[in-house]
Amino acid sequence: MLAVVLAMGSLLLSAAGLVSIVPPDTEPLAFVAGDSAQPLDSTQLAAPVMGFDSVTLAASVQGEVLFTRNCAQCHAVKEVVVGPALKDVHKRRSIAWLVPWVRNSSKMVASGDEYAVKIFDQYQQQQMPSFQLSTKEIKSIMAYIEIESIRSSMMVVGCP
Ligand code: HEC
């Protein structure tokens, strides 16, 4: 019994260290890097566990910078700030919707897009600014949000 509890404990610990949930065919980055004494940063944590490819990961690094600069005053991933929490927004909305929304949300509200009108009303008709960002830049912000969404769910499991 104790052994089971201990085994469970070490499983949790290794989950926190993100070792046990790595798919068997994937080499964990920490091991590739060969220096387990080095703390992992968020992108390294994300890579082996969630199976994001390096292109998505690289994009998310740019996305984090763009998010901090343009969106963070009104949005967080987990909490409502001025605008909605953006956790899992990639599951609610397609890129084809998100790109024109970020570029000009009021145009989408004016066009009568059902979801746009609903969320605009829900947030006291507060207008989100328009951003001169490229599709690539917006996709990189979404890659960052997607990774943060998964990471924030994992934190709950890993660190009770
Ligand atoms: C000045 C505040 C403000 C800034 C800055 C801002 N937003 Fe928003 N955002 C809002 C508000 C308010 C809403 C709710 C809809 C509305 O009122 O138009 C919203 C809604 C959204 C939605 C829809 C969310 C959902 O749950 O469906 C997305 C996606 C979004 N914003 C992305 C972004 C991104 C990406 C940036 C940065 C490039 C950004 N926003 C910058 C205020 C802001």
Image (tube, grey):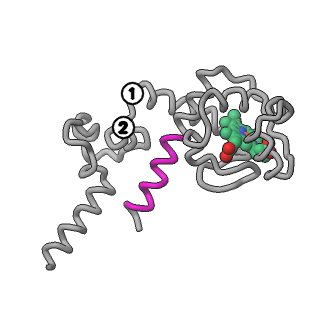
Where's residue 97, x and y in %?
A: 66, 31
Q: In this view, does 26 lie above or below 75?
A: above
Q: Are marks 1 and 2 in contact (CB under 8 Å)?
A: yes
| Image height of 15 relative to 24, above or below | below
Rendering quadrant holding ligand 1: top right
- Residue 47 bears which disc, if any? 2
> In the depicted view, which residue is nearer to us: 108 or 40?
108
Find residue 66 and report its image quarter: top right
Q: What is the crowding at mark 2: few (fewer than 14 residues within 10 Å), some, or many (at least 20)? A: many
Q: Which residue is drawn at 74% across and 48% down?
A: 83
Q: In which quarter of the image is residue 41?
A: top left
- The quarter of the picture where the C terminus appears is bottom left
Q: Classify residue 143 as left or right of residue 29.
A: right
Q: What residue sits 25% from the left and 40% below the top?
A: 28
Query: Which amino acid, by three-letter code, is at mark 1?
Result: Ser
- The first of marks 1 and 2 along the sequence is 2
Identity, as a three-letter code, of the amino acid under mark 2: Ala
Label 1 sits on residue: 54
